[in-house]
Amino acid sequence: MEQDTPLEGTPQKIERPSPLTGLANAWLAVVAVVFFGGRELIEGNFDTGPLGGFIWIAVGALAVIAVIALGIGLLQWRTTTFIVDDEFRIERRLVSRTTTRIDFTKVQSVDIHRPLAARVLGLAEVRIDVGGQAPQSLRFLKNERAESLRDHLLARMGQATLPTLPDGAAPGEAPPPSTPATPAQVVYKASTKHVLLGSFLSMGILSVLIAAVIIAFTLILARTIPIVLLIALLGIFWQVPKQLLTNWGFTISRVDEGLQIQRGALTRVQMTLRPDRVQAVAIDQSLLMRLAGLHTIRLTVLGNHLTADESANIDVLMPFGKWDEARYVLGLIWPNVDPETFAWYAQSPRGRRLSWFADHNFTITDDVFAVRHEMLSHSIRIVPHARVQGLGIQQGALQRLFGFGTVRAHTIDGPVHVQAYHLDVPVARQLFEDELARSTAARDDKAAEPFAAEPTAADPTWAPPAWPR
């Protein structure tokens, strides 16, 4: 890494991202210019009249895009520095000078992202989650430096949250180095067969029906499949390769900081999940996934900020798996929570007037408040008592007419919403009071956290069961 003159005060090591950052950002345009331009030049298509002029314009536009992307990448490399000292500091001086200081006590997790071009060049992006705002990122560092920076930040994060100073340490003195990190232990690996099947089934029954109707009418009327139809079908079925590429090689390992999730075929993502930051869990089954006995586990996690390239997977704990598989994976974050043992309370027969087409149930255990909804799709939503930030009883117009209410547990914004539908008003009020008392007591009792129990034992010979129970 390059070292510059210190900014001010005592000398500090000032580091920069890799100079290949521009190439990693512009790789798609560069590859397109080389491929199409080289092929047309070899075949001599540049001299074939008007078509050749159009090809020149297209290749020239791609070349301009590639040059601009490379230039921006070089400017970002030259104007971005970071310093690892008593705090982590990122400085950017492209147009205006911006300094971002990150206190180690605010670091929640450090993730590593490796897009395809970065993997080829041996680079990685480091994303630092600081909880209440969008994550800070460094694009791109050498793989070795990215991993060492992540390990250092996580170690300092753990030291910064120690409640007391070690014996003999003076105030303000840096804590001694922590014990060597234990090697990551793989505790779960998604079945390739389940990922392949689940990726196809995840697009939903509506998409399948629309595609089938379009193909049938086209074959009947045109007796062929035109290019426009192929493009339309690609748009409908795009969810299949997207899910497959995103969830390929999905692995969970146990590390000192919690769980480490790795996934992705082209872009390889490595995320750290701390069980104490999980606010709520959803175990979902779409209609097609029910036929195959597959489930998906999604999370609401404190500090997760969705981005366009990963909005479908940043909150996934298990992409596709059987029921026993889902119970096992849930036990990795909440060892004493097992949906198989829940005693479900059904809504009253009167409540079926508003939901005759669905079945809604709820339960309260010593640790969690959970609901189950069964219609075309099935879903189980679970929130620990200690994670309930507020409760509410809602009544729509029809609910007021029939004397029903919906009890909703409020957590942070996320994909998981926990609410018990269409309860008789006395039952809704009793559930509200009971959960209010439990959540208030649980927030003051650290032993009430579901992750406070001993972690689920990892069996190195464990494999997903063939069928659900």
Image: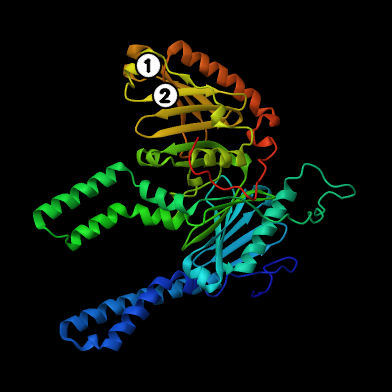
Determine the secondary structure under disc 2: strand
Q: In the rendered view, does 177 fall on the left or right side of 392?
A: right
Give the residue drawn at x 54%, y 71%.
77
Rendered location of residue 8, percent (x, y): 70, 66
Q: Quadrant of the N terminus?
A: bottom right
Question: In the drawing, what numbered circle is on residue 151?
Answer: none
User: Which image quadrant is residue 394 in?
Assistant: top left
Q: Is residue 385 above or below residue 200?
A: above
- Dot 2: within a 10 Å radius of its alpha carbon, few (fewer than 14), some, or many (20 or more) residues? many
Q: In the rendered view, does 377 fall on the left or right side of 469?
A: left
Q: In the rendered view, does 207 fall on the left or right side of 124?
A: left
Q: Which residue is mark 1?
A: 351
Determine the secondary structure under disc 1: helix
Q: Are marks 1 and 2 in contact (CB under 8 Å)?
A: yes
Q: Amino acid at mark 2?
A: His
Q: Residue furthest left?
A: 221
User: Which image quadrant is residue 219 in?
Assistant: bottom left
Q: Is residue 420 above or below residue 125?
A: above
Q: Amino acid at mark 1?
A: Gly
Rendered location of residue 454, percent (x, y): 70, 38
Q: Which residue is mark 2?
A: 360
Q: How is the image coloured?
A: rainbow
Rendered location of residue 124, percent (x, y): 56, 65
Is residue 389 among the parts visible in the rendering? no
Rendered location of residue 11, percent (x, y): 74, 69
Q: Is residue 129 above or below residue 369?
A: below
Give the residue drawn at x 43%, y 72%.
26
